[in-house]
Amino acid sequence: MTIPLNQRVVLDTDVKVKNLTVLGTLEFARNDLMLESDFIAVRGALRIGDAINPFKQRATITLTSDVTESAMNMGSRGIPVMGGRLEVYGVVPIALPTAAAVLKFQLCSVTG
């Protein structure tokens, strides 16, 4: 599958394709989405969220190829970006305190 130059496609459902070449723009809609492909090449733009509105949903990209030979000396799997842009903006997860950290805080906060 090829997304042509100057064309914008919004991915709004789970997709499984053999190969994907992005010459234009592929943008993930604000849904939990899965994209499966043996190979994905980006020469245009692949966008998941943006700096102002990070992607809060779950985006899963799975490379399904069983090829073990290196392609163009870049390994057997990956998303090569050749003259294009891979833009992924997500929400930074908030780390929950460990039990030890909570206990230490409580012990330090108690005054006699």
Image (spheres, rainbow, N blue to C red):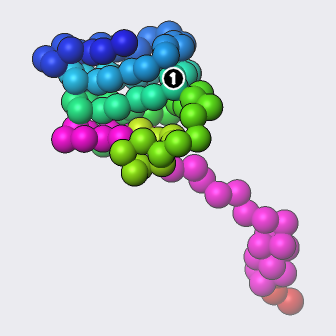
Q: Nearer the viewer, residue 60 or 104?
A: 60
Q: Residue at x 77, y 73 (%)?
A: 101
Find residue 85 and report its horizontal and vertical position in percent: 25, 39
Find residue 45 and report its horizontal and vertical position in percent: 26, 31
The disc labelled 1 sits on which kind of residue? Ser
Q: Residue at x 39, y 21 (%)?
A: 20
> In the displayed structure, would residue 56 be above or below residue 51?
above
Q: Quadrant of residue 48 in the image?
A: top left
Q: Which residue was labeled with disc 1?
A: 37
> In the displayed structure, would residue 69 be above or below residue 63?
below
Residue 72 visible in rendering = yes
Q: Residue furthest front?
A: 69
Find residue 86 and report its horizontal and vertical position in percent: 32, 39
Give the extent of the magenta segment: 80-109
Q: Quadrant of the C terminus?
A: bottom right
Queried whether the magenta region covers residue 90, the answer comes back as yes
